[in-house]
């Protein structure tokens, strides 16, 4: 990986029992397909955890789903065939349609047919099959990057839902976003209360 990005997993003892938690920061300089390959490693591990009986899971991640806006014009950020083939939708919407809308938590799922046509390896397309994660935030409205530093004459040049909390077998009680002034970070923070 170019940016030395990592994913970590921890199993926590909580009031709802064991919860497997993932944190990830996916690469920004690879395009959508590169991020999908990285994310497939998390989904593969999720499937292994489910086989061990650990069904409650959370992914808290900066997926760097930023192939939209002016970033789409940069071959540094968007350097694969989806750079323009995903026009008309944000990268977050693309992930929602092509990854999170198709679920199979079986130990050996079929490959994700939507991703096979983009030239990803069959094993990656099997691994990335969603194991049942849902996003409690809206892929269009809950934008986590719209920093005033990236605006010209009031126009947002670089905006998108880059940060995600994905839940499996957990019930959402409340959710929130903060850092609307972008003082603490160039991203907004996300918070979910579950039971």
Image (cartoon, rainbow, N blue to C red):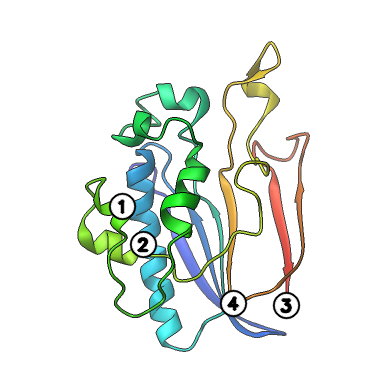
Image location of residue 103, percent across then percent down:
44, 67
The disc placed on residue 195 is 3
The disc placed on residue 115 is 1
Rendered residue at 26%/45% (across/down): 118
Rendered residue at 31%/73% (across/down): 109
Image location of residue 51, percent across then percent down:
40, 86
Which dot, 1 or 2, sits closer to the camera? Answer: 1
Q: Reading the chain from its start, which is encountered first: label 2 or label 3?
A: 2
Rendered residue at 24%/48% (across/down): 117
Few, some or many residues within 10 Å of mark 1 (<14, 14–19, 20+): many
Rendered residue at 40%/31% (across/down): 77
Is residue 184 rendered to the left or right of residue 88? right
The quarter of the displayed image where residue 21 is located: bottom right
Most foreground residue, 6 or 110: 110
Most foreground residue, 152 or 29: 152
Cβ–Cβ under 8 Å for marks 1 and 2: yes
Location of mark 4 (residue): 169
Cβ–Cβ under 8 Å for marks 4 and 1: no
Location of mark 2 (residue): 128
Q: How far apart are the two marked residues, 1 and 2, measured between alpha carbons?
A: 9 Å
Q: How far apart are the two marked residues, 2 and 3, measured between alpha carbons?
A: 26 Å
Question: Vertically, is 63 above or below 193?
Answer: above
Q: How far apart are the two marked residues, 2 and 4, measured between alpha carbons?
A: 18 Å
Q: Reading the chain from its start, which is encountered first: label 4 or label 1?
A: 1
């Amino acid at each position: 990986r170019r940016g030395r990005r990592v994913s970590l997993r921890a199993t926590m003892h909580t009031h709802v029992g064991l919860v497997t938690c993932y944190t990830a920061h996916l690469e920004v300089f690879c395009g959508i397909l590169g991020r999908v390959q990285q994310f497939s490693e998390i989904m593969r591990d999720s499937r292994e955890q489910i086989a061990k009986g650990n069904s409650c899971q959370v992914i808290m991640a900066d997926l760097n789903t930023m192939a939209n806006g002016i970033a789409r014009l940069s071959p540094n950020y968007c350097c694969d065939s989806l750079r323009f083939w995903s026009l008309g939708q944000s990268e977050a919407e693309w992930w929602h349609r092509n990854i999170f809308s198709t679920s199979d938590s079986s130990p050996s799922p079929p490959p994700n047919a939507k991703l096979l046509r983009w030239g990803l390896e069959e094993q990656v397309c099997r691994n990335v099959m969603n194991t049942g994660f849902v996003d409690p935030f809206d892929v269009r409205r809950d934008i986590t990057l719209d920093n005033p530093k990236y605006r010209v004459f009031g126009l947002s040049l670089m905006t998108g839902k880059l940060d995600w909390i994905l839940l499996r077998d957990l019930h959402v009680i409340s959710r929130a976003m903060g850092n609307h002034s972008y003082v603490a970070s160039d991203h907004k923070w996300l918070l979910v209360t579950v039971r």
